[in-house]
Image (spheres, rainbow, N blue to C red):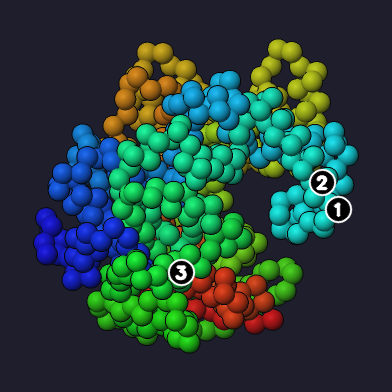
Amino acid sequence: MFEGDIMFTEEQEAVISSKHNRIVCLACAGSGKTTVLIERVNRLISEGISHNHILILTFTNAAAHEMKQRYCVKYGSRCIPMFCTFHSFCYQLILNDANIRKYLKYSSIPQIADESNIKQLETTAKLQTNCKLSKAKLTGQTPLKPNEKFIYNVYAHKLDILYHQHNLITFDMLLESISKLFLQDHPLIQKYKSQYQHILVDEFQDTSYDQWDFVKSFTDADIFVCGDIAQNIYSFRGTTSKIIKQLVSNDSWLTLKLSTNFRSTNQICEFANNIFKNSDIAIDMHGICTGDPVKRDTMEYIPYMQMIDTNKLNDIVELLSNLKGTSAILCRTNKEVESIYDYLADLGISLSSTTAYKDYCKLLKAVYNNDYLAEWLSSLLPIDLYENYLRLCTLSTDKSKLELLYNMNISKEIYRYLELVIQIRKIMKNTEDTNTLKFQNLLRLLEIPVEMYESLIVDNTISAKDVIDVCIRYIESLDISTLYVGTVHSVKGLEFDNVFVIGAYGPTWDIDKDDNRNLFYVACTRAKDVLYVYRGVS
């Protein structure tokens, strides 16, 4: 089948065109599942299904945004179905439906609680209830003893009251409260259950039981889920691959597969397949082009310090000089990332990292939130400088908090961030510019090519803060063009021409454990042409 310039395989065509009302699609890495999902959505609309009756759920704002953008580029922006995360869908219901807010005992639209809000309210609840239970027991990581359940219930009740008093809600509370309404088939949500006739879930291997209960509550809707069991790397967040296994063994569900990897060479695919050679959970994928064999080497690993042999890093630098395209060095831990990043940066190599992108997003969030700015500064400044900064803030009445930092012995990096915050605030406060122009000026300031986002329509009626939010979403979903150094978790969904995997089989990356094995698989399948694996030794 051809669609524009794309020729779909038989497997892809089956996924796009199947009219079964319960489908689980097992899609290997690099199989073009996002393209296929978008085509399936378009097929539904072309057959007369209203875009208002289609709900596409995924797990990150970046992924939802990417799918929406790709759909708009190909099929226009007039009739766009709902692309969103589980949490953003729930929040939209609270945002737009006063009756739901009233039922949940919110007199106005609640704000999403950030980490500092959550920590403060939890501390207050513990103090006011004299609760001595550990954090592990309060968060459900450790089971409660029978005599502890009453204490926990008192604490939980008090915490709930505090959230409502401060008009705050967490992401977990969002999903839990809205899911409960759907599961109870409450009259308040009947119109929403009848509205969405087709539910499509991407990255289904990352689904939690609460999220799956929510999806199942749409009993009359056609349900399509797509995922790769081998790429389940978020079990620490409560996600589980057991659900997708149950569906595969359920006769009422049709199982379809996407087993062609269009990203990686066949040699890389074979190497990745061998990671699960004795397992029945992964898809046996194959590539469409040949390349060089996977290179393997050893890299000395120093326990606790989490440093690596610089001689090996020099070898990687030499290899990179002869490789074409994008490259990534992937590690298991953030400390390993920091060690490698610092060493390569000192050599003058152009780098991007997880930290760099996170800092840009933090900077943008600080533009409209002085409390967030202060919290961020506390993580950047040495404790003595931060305490001095707070003292000056208390004493000063005529200077801004940012100005107070200029005469302090701060690093060039922090100074640059502060300068950027001030410049961004000036852009946003300029009343003569439209928000579209503000958006473009902001991208230029951050050295992000404006032409990358020509497909984005920025409505002049939106607020300047909305412009900031758009920029944050884009930065979170940016493709990486320089040498990237980061954790495997940070590159989920990305691809590079060349990948160097550091420390596999070592003390921090024991691939005999399920989660680590999945991480190793994800790391290897980010590579298109060249894959080097450096074994870690203690």
Left or right of 277, for residue 135:
right
Q: Is residue 319 above or below residue 293?
A: above
Earlier sequence position, callout 3 versus callout 1: 1
Please say if the residues under marks 3 and 1 sit with CB atoms less than 8 Å apart. Answer: no
**How far is mark 3 from mark 2, CA to CA?**
35 Å
Residue 297 visible in image: yes
* Residue lying at 34% horizontally and 39% vertically, measured from the top left: 194
Give the residue number, with chain letter if any, for mark 2: 150
Query: Residue 361: x percent and y percent?
Result: 52, 40
**The C terminus sits in image quarter:** bottom right
Please say if the residues under marks 2 and 1 sit with CB atoms less than 8 Å apart. Answer: yes
Q: Is residue 173 above or below residue 390?
A: below
* Residue lying at 41% horizontally and 67% vertically, measured from the top left: 247
**How far is mark 3 from mark 1, CA to CA?**
35 Å
Earlier sequence position, callout 3 versus callout 2: 2
Which label number is shown at residue 420? none
* Residue lying at 54% horizontally and 59% vertically, measured from the top left: 239
In front here: 368 or 301? 368
Residue at disc 1, secondary structure: helix
Residue at disc 3, secondary structure: helix
* Residue lying at 70% horizontally and 42% vertically, measured from the top left: 379
Give the residue number, with chain letter if any, for mark 3: 246
Query: Residue 97: x percent and y percent?
Result: 45, 26
Query: Residue 287: x percent and y percent?
Result: 29, 77
Residue at disc 2, secondary structure: helix
